[in-house]
Amino acid sequence: MDGVLKYMSEILPSLLQGTKLTLGLFAMTLLLSLPLGALVSLGLRSRFKPLRWILKFYVWLMRGTPLLLQLIFIFYGLPVLHIYFERFSAAAFAFVLNYAAYFAEIFRGGFQSVDTGQYEAARILRLNYGQTIRKIVLPQVTKIVLPSVGNEVINLVKDSSLVYVIGLGDLLRAGNVAMVRDVTLVPLLMVGAIYLILTALFTYLLRKVEQHYSYYQ
């Protein structure tokens, strides 16, 4: 038992280093894809048909193809067109585009759930479109979409392991390297434990956010 604990303490720094990259990708994806998804959802409601068609095609493409395929295409396929990304930039670009499409559909459903009377009341109060969205609609939409957004956030934590395919030293890659080198399943068990801790932490934080918006009920 002492030998196992000693081994775990030896590989823990490399796993934590991989966790750092995983959390960095997670934070960047969430920070960029949420507002982008909200903007795309507004564009899907636009009266300008060409814009709607383009955005519908983008959402269909991102949701209809695997994230792994998108990641491989951006990092390995785009160089054929002389478009190059560093590994982390390629991963962030693929994740942001993919998750923004999912968030766009979630927000679109949220916007459709807001009663049209809210918009009419805003016009009576002489609020312009931007003020109506920001002050009246978005707080209600946020409350509506929080559970669905929360599910995607948890999926994002786990999907981050896909960057292993382009050679990024994330948590899963660090665990796999240790497993192959030392011929033991202990690193993968530790990786699973870290992922469980991360998902439990983010689930707790999301519950707190939902409670904060409970006053809209």
Image (cartoon, rainbow, N blue to C red):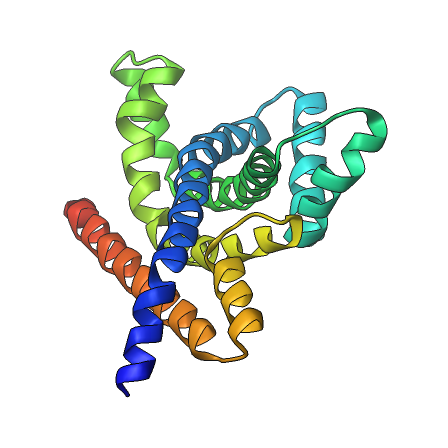
What quarter of the picture does the N terminus occupy? bottom left
Q: Residue at x 46, y 39 (%)?
A: 29
Q: Residue 134 falls in which quadrant of the image?
A: top left
Left or right relative to 67: residue 177: left
Residue at the extreme right = 80
Counting the numbered discs, the total is 0
Could one spot residue 204 in this view of the protein?
Answer: yes
User: Where does the image place residue 63, in percent across and percent down from the top left?
Assistant: 65, 49
Q: Residue 119 falls in which quadrant of the image?
A: top left
Q: Nearer the viewer, residue 95 or 39?
A: 95
Q: Residue at x 59, y 37 (%)?
A: 97
Left or right relative to 170: residue 68: right
Q: Is residue 161 above or below residue 183?
A: above
Could one spot residue 149 in this view of the protein?
Answer: no
Q: Is residue 144 above or below residue 4?
A: above
Left or right relative to 178: residue 163: right
Residue at the extreme bottom = 1
Q: Residue at x 50, y 80 (%)?
A: 184
User: Where does the image place residue 31, in percent across and percent down from the top left?
Assistant: 40, 34
User: Where does the image place residue 115, in percent across and percent down from the top left?
Assistant: 37, 39
